[in-house]
Amino acid sequence: MSIDELKAEVLRLDPQTRAYLARELLASLDTLSEAEIEKLWLDEAIRRDEELSSGAAQAYPADEVLDRARARRK
């Protein structure tokens, strides 16, 4: 089963069950070593860089993003 298939299946669960599963998954990350955590962050940085390079994602200046976020809170 692929990640996308698993995600689709999990999203069919009721909200209480999804919340329980989310807590369990997050708790499982607490046992990672520093090296494993660093690898995950590096993998994420590479993924984001590839999205920017391919045009799948667009970067915005931090002040612009913060201004938009503040405007949404009002």
Image (cartoon, rainbow, N blue to C red):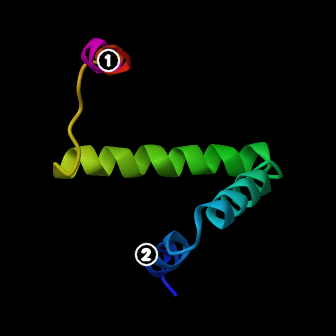
**Residue 11, which numbered label?**
none
Q: Which residue is mark 1?
A: 62
Residue 55: percent from left, percent from top: 16, 48
Mark 2: give few (<14), some (14-19) or many (20+) Cα within 10 Å.
few
Horizontally, residue 2 falls left or right of residue 59, namely right
Please tell me whether residue 7 is drawn above or below residue 65 in the rendered image. below
Query: From this viewpoint, which residue is outermost toward the left?
Result: 55
**Residue 4, which numbered label?**
2
Please tell me whether residue 16 is drawn above or below residue 1 in the rendered image. above
Q: Are marks 2 and 1 in contact (CB under 8 Å)?
A: no
Query: Residue at position x 73%, y 54% from top?
Result: 23
Q: Quadrant of residue 59?
A: top left
Secondary structure beneath label 2: helix
Q: Quadrant of residue 16?
A: bottom right
Query: Residue at position x 24%, y 44% from top?
Result: 52
Camera-nearest label, 2 or 1: 2
**Magenta highlight range:** 63-69
* The C terminus - image quarter: top left
Q: Nearer the viewer, residue 4 or 45?
A: 4
User: Overall secondary structure of the magenta stretch?
Assistant: helix
At label 1, the amino acid type is Ala
Query: Residue at position x 27%, y 50% from top?
Result: 51
Horizontally, residue 45 falls left or right of residue 51, namely right
At label 2, the amino acid type is Asp
Marks 2 and 1, the one that precedes in the sequence: 2
Task: Give me the C-alpha separation between circle 2 and circle 1.
Answer: 31 Å
Residue 67: percent from left, percent from top: 29, 13
